[in-house]
Image (tube, helix red, strand yellow):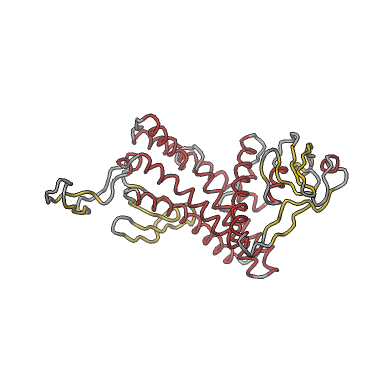
């Protein structure tokens, strides 16, 4: 194991950057839409630091996981807008000089529905933006691995399907493959059904079909290919391939969720803060012999993964998550009827309690897995 101090510092920095990006998205778009934000907090648990701003209080909490951007009047909470924070306007548009007032910001429930939808979606969207910005740095220095086959393993499905070295795989079951990682994720998380492979050989597009082999020891599916040529992206290609990198993590997260929902996942496939800390520690140990810069790039890769995961998971239609709130807002936008805030708040509270129970179960399993 590495220095626990280095692991802790890396853990705090990664979680802080990912969470601040998410909550800042909520904050920025809410303010643009005239929604007042009462509190912008980073972390969970007791408050370590408070700074009262003109309209928003910044709070730093003890545990460096999670965060919150609390809108005024959200979920039926009583509005705390102070009428003193109003700005004068001159004229009513009829040419008569007159003074009237309008609030600088309004409660969440009083904002237009599409403004509220934008504020909710902004958190996950900013996580994707952060992942792209970090990918620009990582891909510039590391390049990417292209989906080109460099070797065929004997007696595996790929050989029987006629695939050869130097073939470039461009699609698997209709899913575009821009990186070697795309090929890996679509085969590893396969359900064992036949896969339609589209590839390019000598400039000609071809198709074949194969059934992945299930390895009884790992429980993973393989098709029997090796590959991944390194492509230098220290040029304008970095813009395109950085997005392909983010796209891969988006696809991997969604495919993993489908894999879990399909009943293939185990509890050990989930990781909470302790599990992530273990991953960070293992990654530092593997990267350290190659130098400090390699460690930094590895930590940025973990930040990209976590940022995309946070963005996708928050859009799930689960109460207390952004996706759960989005369902209520979309219902209002379509039907024109607003769900009573106090009833919506109860639903989110129940969802929050269930999520806390899940977090505790995952935490206990993470600790047990650490000792195992």
Q: Which of 141 and 273 is in front in this view?
A: 141
Q: Which quadrant is the N terminus positioned in?
A: bottom right
Q: Where is residue 21 in the image (x, y as percent from the top left)?
A: 47, 55
For image coordinates 29% across by 55% down, the residue present is 55
Q: Where is residue 340 in the image (x, y as percent from the top left)?
A: 33, 33
For image coordinates 48% across by 54% down, the residue present is 19
Q: Position of residue 299 (x, y in %)?
A: 60, 61
Q: Relative to 199, say whether 132 is above or below.
A: below
Q: Position of residue 90 (x, y in %)?
A: 16, 52
In this picture, residue 159 sits left or right of residue 64: right
For image coordinates 74% across by 41% down, the residue present is 198
Instruction: Pick out the residue farthest to the bottom.
Output: 291
Q: Which of 42 and 371 is in front in this view?
A: 42
Q: Relative to 6, say whether 175 is above or below.
A: above
Count of labels in the image: 0
Instruction: Pick out the residue farthest to the front.
Output: 203
In this picture, residue 360 sits left or right of residue 222: left
For image coordinates 39% across by 50% down, the residue present is 29
């Amino acid at each position: 194991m590495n220095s626990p101090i280095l692991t802790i510092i890396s853990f705090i920095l990664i979680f802080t950057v990912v969470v601040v990006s998410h909550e800042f998205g909520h904050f920025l778009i809410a303010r643009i839409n005239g929604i007042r934000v009462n509190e912008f907090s980073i972390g969970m648990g007791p408050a370590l630091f408070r700074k009262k701003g003109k309209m928003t209080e910044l709070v730093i909490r003890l545990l460096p996981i999670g965060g919150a951007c609390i809108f005024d009047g959200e979920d039926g909470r009583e509005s705390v807008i102070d009428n003193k924070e109003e700005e004068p306007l001159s004229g009513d548009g009829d040419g008569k000089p007159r003074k009237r007032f309008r609030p600088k910001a309004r409660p969440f429930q009083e904002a237009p529905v599409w403004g509220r939808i934008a504020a909710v979606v902004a958190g996950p969207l900013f996580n994707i933006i952060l992942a792209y910005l970090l990918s620009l740095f990582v891909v510039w220095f590391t390049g990417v691995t292209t989906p080109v086959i460099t070797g065929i393993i004997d007696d595996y499905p790929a050989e029987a399907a006629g695939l050869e070295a130097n073939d470039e795989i461009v699609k698997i079951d209709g899913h575009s493959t821009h990186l070697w990682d795309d090929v890996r994720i679509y085969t590893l998380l396969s359900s064992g059904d036949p896969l339609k492979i589209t590839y390019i050989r000598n400039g000609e597009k071809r198709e074949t079909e194969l059934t992945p082999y299930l390895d009884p020891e790992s429980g993973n599916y393989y098709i029997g290919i090796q590959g991944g040529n390194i492509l230098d992206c220290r040029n304008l290609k970095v813009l395109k391939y950085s997005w392909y990198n983010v796209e891969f993590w988006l696809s991997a997260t969604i495919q993993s969720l489908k894999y879990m929902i399909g009943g293939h996942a185990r509890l050990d496939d989930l990781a909470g803060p302790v599990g992530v800390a273990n991953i960070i520690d293992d990654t530092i140990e593997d990267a350290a012999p190659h130098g400090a810069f390699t460690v930094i790039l590895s930590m940025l890769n973990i930040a990209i993964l976590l940022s995309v995961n946070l963005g996708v998971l928050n859009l799930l239609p689960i109460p207390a998550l952004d996706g759960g709130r989005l369902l209520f807002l979309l219902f209002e936008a379509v039907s024109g009827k607003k769900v009573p805030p106090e009833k919506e708040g109860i639903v989110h509270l129940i969802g929050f309690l269930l999520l806390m129970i899940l977090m505790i179960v995952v935490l206990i399993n993470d600790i047990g897995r650490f000792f195992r």
